């Protein structure tokens, strides 16, 4: 396997892992009904990966895989600390703010990629 194909495989694995992290963060325990799906947490958690998926046509190789790795690690750390280590019903809003900040940073990266590689110019 070449370095390029490893980076491409890693990119798809990061997208799948990020979607799973968003789902795990959205399934929260409920005191009398088992678990419930917090839809707003799910949508907010998926937002950075939607923005990251928009980078696929413009960045390639490790230039695409490294930002994805940072997104997954930061989001995974946030979910682990908010959901599993100190779960307080997401009362402080960190579970929403961190994915929104990651999505914003990813959109800034997308703007940079579009400026460097405008569509229609090959």
Image (tube, grey):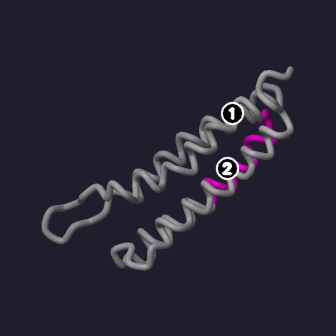
Q: Is residue 23 left or right of residue 49?
A: left
Secondary element under disc 2, as helix, strand or loop, is: helix
Residue at position x 79%, y 35% from top? 61
Q: Is residue 77 left or right of residue 33?
A: right
Q: Is residue 41 magenta?
A: no
User: Which badge, 2 or 1, is on the more N-terminal residue?
Assistant: 1
Q: Which mark is residue 56?
A: 1
Residue 46: percent from left, percent from top: 49, 49
Q: Nearer the viewer, residue 122 or 25?
A: 122
Q: Quadrant of the N terminus?
A: top right
Tell me which segment is drawn in magenta. Answer: 59-73
Residue 109: percent from left, percent from top: 75, 49
Circle 1 Cα neighbour tier, 10 Å, few/some/many (<14 / 14–19 / ≥20): some
Q: Is residue 63 magenta?
A: yes
Q: Quadrant of the C terminus?
A: top right
Is 117 above or below relative to 34?
A: above
């Amino acid at each position: 396997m070449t370095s390029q194909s490893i980076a491409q495989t890693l990119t798809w694995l990061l997208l799948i892992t990020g979607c799973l992290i968003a789902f795990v963060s959205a399934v929260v325990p409920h005191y009398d009904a088992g678990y419930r799906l917090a839809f707003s947490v799910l949508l907010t958690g998926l937002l950075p990966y939607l923005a990251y998926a928009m980078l696929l046509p413009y960045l390639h190789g490790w230039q695409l895989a490294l930002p994805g790795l940072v997104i997954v690690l930061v989001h995974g750390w946030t979910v682990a600390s908010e959901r599993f280590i100190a779960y307080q019903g997401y009362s402080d809003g960190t579970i929403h703010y961190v994915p929104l900040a990651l999505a914003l940073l990813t959109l800034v990266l997308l703007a940079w990629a579009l400026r460097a590689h405008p569509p229609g110019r090959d």
